[in-house]
Image (tube, helix red, strand yellow):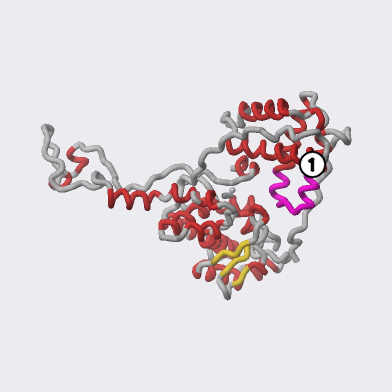
Amino acid sequence: MRGRGKRKPYEPIEAADPESILAQIDRHIRWLEARQYAASGLKTRRGELIRFGRWCAERGVERPFDLNRTVIELYQRYLARRVKADGLPLSPKTQWLKLSYVATFCKWLARERLVLYDPAADLEMPRQGLSLPRAVLSQEEVERILAVPDTGTVLGLRDRAILETFYSTAIRRSELAWLGMCDLDLGRGVLAVRHGKGNRDRFVPLGERAQAWIRRYLEESRPELAAYGDDGALFLSADGTALAPNWVGEMVRKAIDAAGVKKPGGCHLFRHTAATLMLEGGADIRFIQQLLGHAKLETTQIYTRVSIEQLKAVHQATHPGARLRSGGVRKTEGGVRDPGSGVREEEAGWPRILLDEEEEGDEEDLRLTLAAEEDSEDT
């Protein structure tokens, strides 16, 4: 059976001095691990703190008592000036996250009496601003993507069931990869999402269509995949093991490309779409919060800013200039008539304005881990 919840032990951080900052980072990570912090988040945190420790060592800041407010602020300025491989600076969210790891570490140092005071206690963090999921799939685009897998094959049927699950439940890719057979209740039509972001568990509804595809996958595909081994995961790889989150993300992205949908993003594109379409369909935002597994309502409220269809409907109903009225535009010196005259706008030389055109833009995947951003999949 699947080793759910088991962690591979981290390799000790190489530090010649057992009292060094790097050695204390190793202790700090193990302290967090003992308190059941999510393994995926700890891996990212560990990597960022090691970078911080090495940055300090390069500047002669070797031990915790060498840390002070000036050192932390210098590191903050270093992050603000740092650029990525594409030449762009780190986003405010990335800077905030990197500094939050350092701030938590400094707080732990003070708790362990390894420093006289917390050097990051009054640090002014970067303003993150508002990140919006700026691309949402239309229903027609969703159907094109869902139709990509060849459901006549074992793996194609599995992939269709995965895509249907994403669209129905709006779960994160890591949450889907970690689903076990014991988390599925087709009788009640629900999935149990265990160890979600923030190590929070929740139940999410599973739509009838998704249930039908999962049931078919369980009957026709999973038995063949499980013949090579079965670790208890709901969705199995070709060798009978659980799917890796990165692989899931790549599969979804390939399906989006194969469908000819020119919008960036992967698994989170389904997440944003489900949340936005439910909101436009009249769902209470508190129910969407529960579905997405957000700890704070403020996180879910970004979707109220994205729901352009609702804004357009209100604008059309209330704004006095939102509609063209008969007789409102007359023949001009150049011979242009009003749109109701039977003359096509293009023929008359008018600029073509689509008043009901959907807003479109790039998708910013709202993941709250550096690994996800640099990999560019969770809000």
Q: Which residue is mark 1?
A: 111
Q: Is residue 375 magenta?
A: no
**Disc 1 residue type (three-letter):** Arg
Residue 96 screen position, x and y as percent = 62, 37
| 196 and 251: which is toward the camera | 196
Helix, strand or loop for the magenta stretch, by majority = helix
Please identify the residue farthest to the bottom as the structure is shown. Answer: 187
Total tally of numbered discs in the picture: 1
Bounds of the magenta span? 29-44
Q: Secondary structure at mark 1?
A: helix
Residue found 54% across the figure and 60% down from its top: 291
Residue 166 screen position, x and y as percent = 54, 59
Note whether 159 is above or below 114 in the view shown.
Answer: below
Tell me if I can see residue 217 in this picture.
yes
Is 104 displayed left or right of 296 in the figure? right
Please identify the residue farthest to the top as the structure is shown. Answer: 59
Is 281 displayed left or right of 7 in the figure? left
Residue found 51% across the figure and 67% down from its top: 207
Q: Quadrant of residue 121?
A: top right
Residue 69 screen position, x and y as percent = 72, 28
Residue 208 screen position, x and y as percent = 50, 70
Tell me if I can see residue 216 in this picture.
no
Residue found 67% across the figure and 36% down from its top: 99
Q: Quadrant of the N terminus?
A: bottom right
Residue found 52% across the figure and 52% down from its top: 300
| 223 and 322: which is toward the camera | 322
Q: Is residue 36 magenta?
A: yes
Query: Within 10 angstroms of label 1, few (less than 14), some, or many (20 or more) residues?
Result: few
Is 269 displayed left or right of 177 in the figure? left
